[in-house]
Amino acid sequence: MITFDKDLENEAVLEVGRLMAAAARTAPKGKGADTIVTALLTADDKDRVAKRMEKIAAEEDIPFFQRDANNIYQVPAVLVIGTSFKPLGIPRCGDCGYADCQACSREGEGRCNFNVIDLGIALGSAVSVAALHHIDNRIMFSCGKAILELGMLPADVKIAYAIPLSITTKSPFFDR
């Protein structure tokens, strides 16, 4: 059996996407509490997200959603990394805007700053793996937002970012 370049490259993108998810999982977390969720979208699932992004672009006149949707159509896979909000019981914190974690939990609307920071660290860890393997990538708010709106992640995930992955002669994310 011979496997040629496009098939080899698509397999590489999927493997690196899996390695990126592993890096996100093992990234340091506040108090060791893991609120991170990862998913790898391909084929019809990623195209469904791109369609939602196009709809947002048209209905709300947000051009960068269309630009980013065009990128999603071009790539074989998209890694999604999100987080839920679970206050960690950090004494004297208040970064969420409430007096403490107990007040944040009671109100149910607070965003634990540690969960958000952990998401950022997980994203950085994931894209470092992509860079190490020479996979073009870009962290996208727009794609993550569309994924959340489509309900593709567990209901408790409140923030998500997407990382489209590409192997092409020229990165589709460069001259945007």
Image (spheres, rainbow, N blue to C red):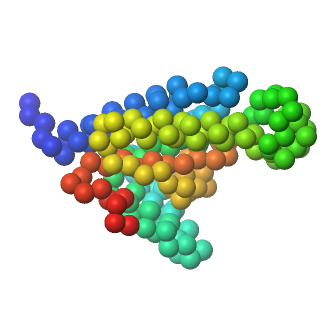
Q: Is residue 76 visible?
A: no
Q: Name the image quarter holding the N terminus.
A: top left
Q: In this view, does 89 lie to the left or right of 57?
A: right
In this rendering, is residue 59 above or below 84?
Answer: below
Most foreground residue, 3 or 128: 128
Which residue, as the protein is rendered here, is positioned at the far top? 32
Closer to the camera in the image, 67 or 96: 96
Q: Within the image, what quadrant is residue 71 found in?
A: bottom left
Q: In the image, what residue occupies the spot 46% across and 28% down?
A: 22
Q: Name the residue at 65% across, 32% down.
A: 35
**x and y percentages locating residue 164 in the rendered image:** 41, 50
Tally of numbered tags? 0
Q: Where is residue 82 in the image (x, y as percent from the top left)?
A: 59, 42
**Residue 78 relative to residue 147: left or right:** left
Q: In which quarter of the image is residue 98?
A: top right
- Where does residue 53 sit, x and y in percent of width and height? 50, 63
- Residue 91 or residue 12, whichever sits in front: 91
136 versus 85 height, above or below: below
